[in-house]
């Protein structure tokens, strides 16, 4: 009689074996923990780079890039100047604009105008009807001298005035004088600025020119001019018909003493340049 279990292979082994559990009491990972702690064997060609070597290579690359930028000659095959860096004069149809020697003076004049004049004459110099005539395209500005406009800025003015053929009646608002508030250099700068903008023209003005007018009009200080009075004065000098004044060393000394320090300094600098 055959064994009924002989036809069933599973009956020949313990149940635990059949179901995959061989009765082990240790975890496989615990058994291999020692092996897993071992580092892999080093292989040739895969060694880690030294940090200082990386820093050195980065420094060399930076130096090389800087050197090429500075001494590349603009990367031009036909250029033999190693210090060449994009010279604008070599670009086609491009000529370097000459620098304006009076640029600093004009900037000062623009600042003086904004802070003292624009409130009445407006930002573009077009003036305000009934309040202030224009300083744009003005024949009072575009002259060969400053005898009139210099006096007008120093002492102020009022009444009707004709500017470039157009009459303006500003009797309701007189222009204030800037003798006590603006220096000779500032007045010269603002006239220079006006002469280079808004359709005006004329030579730059020097502080010594304003200083001379300031001294010559000391007896007029604080008294505003009318346009009729100013028109009697040539733009480049003393009033018409005025008797010549003999300038003695004593008179010259007194006039120099009366000059403000900044005006005297500007006058001396002007004289030493000639």
Image (spheres, helix red, strand yellow):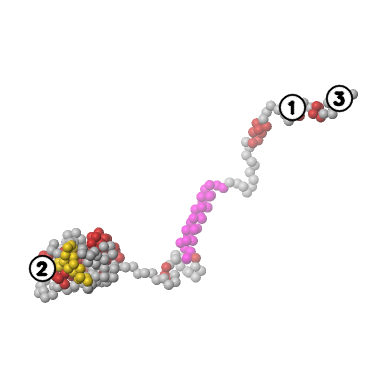
Relative to 217, say whether 43 is above or below.
above
Alpha carbons under labels 3 and 2: distance apart: 154 Å
Crowd class of label 1 (few under 14; some 14 to 19; many from 20; radius 10 Å): few
The residue that mark 1 highlights is 16
- Magenta stretch: dominant secondary structure: helix
Residue 211, position in %: x, y?
18, 65
Residue 62, position in %: x, y?
49, 55
**Label 1 with label 2: CB-CB less than 8 Å:** no
Mark 3 or 2, which is nearer the eye?
3
Asked if residue 266 shows in the view, the reply is no
The mark nearer the N terminus, 1 or 2, is: 1
Does 57 sit left or right of 167 as displayed?
right
Q: Residue sitting at 84 percent across and 29 percent down?
A: 7
Regarding mark 2 in the picture, which secondary structure is present there? helix
The mark nearer the N terminus, 3 or 2, is: 3
Range of magenta residues = 49-74
Residue 239, position in %: x, y?
13, 73
The residue that mark 2 highlights is 251
Does 13 sit left or right of 269 as displayed?
right
Determine which quarter of the picture holds residue 124: bottom left
Query: In the image as oriented, which residue stretches furthest toward the bottom?
Result: 241
The residue that mark 3 highlights is 3
Crowd class of label 3 (few under 14; some 14 to 19; many from 20; radius 10 Å): few
Q: Residue sitting at 64 percent across and 41 percent down?
A: 40
Determine which quarter of the picture holds residue 218: bottom left
């Amino acid at each position: 009689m055959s064994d009924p279990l002989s036809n069933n292979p599973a009956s020949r082994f313990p149940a635990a074996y059949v179901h995959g559990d061989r009765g082990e009491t240790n975890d496989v990972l615990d058994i291999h923990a020692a092996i897993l702690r071992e580092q892999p064997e080093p292989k040739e060609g895969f060694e880690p780079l030294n940090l200082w070597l990386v820093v050195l290579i980065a420094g060399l690359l930076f130096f090389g890039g800087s050197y090429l930028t500075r001494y590349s000659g603009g990367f031009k095959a036909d250029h033999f100047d190693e210090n060449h860096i994009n010279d604008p004069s070599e670009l086609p149809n491009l000529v370097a604009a000459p620098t304006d020697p009076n640029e600093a003076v004009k900037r000062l004049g623009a600042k003086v105008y904004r802070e003292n004049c624009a409130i009445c004459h407006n930002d573009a110099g077009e003036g305000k009807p009934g309040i202030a005539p224009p300083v744009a395209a003005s024949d009072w500005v575009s002259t060969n001298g400053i005898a009139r406009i210099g006096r007008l800025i120093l002492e102020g003015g009022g009444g009707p005035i004709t500017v470039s053929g157009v009459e303006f009646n500003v009797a309701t608002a007189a222009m204030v004088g800037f003798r006590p508030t603006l220096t000779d250099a500032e007045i010269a700068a603002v006239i220079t600025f006006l002469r280079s903008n808004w359709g005006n023209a004329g030579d730059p003005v020097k502080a010594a020119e304003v200083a001379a007018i300031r001294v010559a009009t000391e007896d007029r200080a604080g008294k505003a001019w009318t346009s009729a009075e100013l028109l009697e004065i040539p733009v480049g000098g003393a009033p018409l018909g005025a008797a010549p004044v003999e300038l003695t060393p004593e008179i010259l000394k007194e006039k120099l003493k009366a000059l403000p320090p900044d005006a005297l300094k500007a006058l001396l600098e002007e004289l030493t340049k000639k």
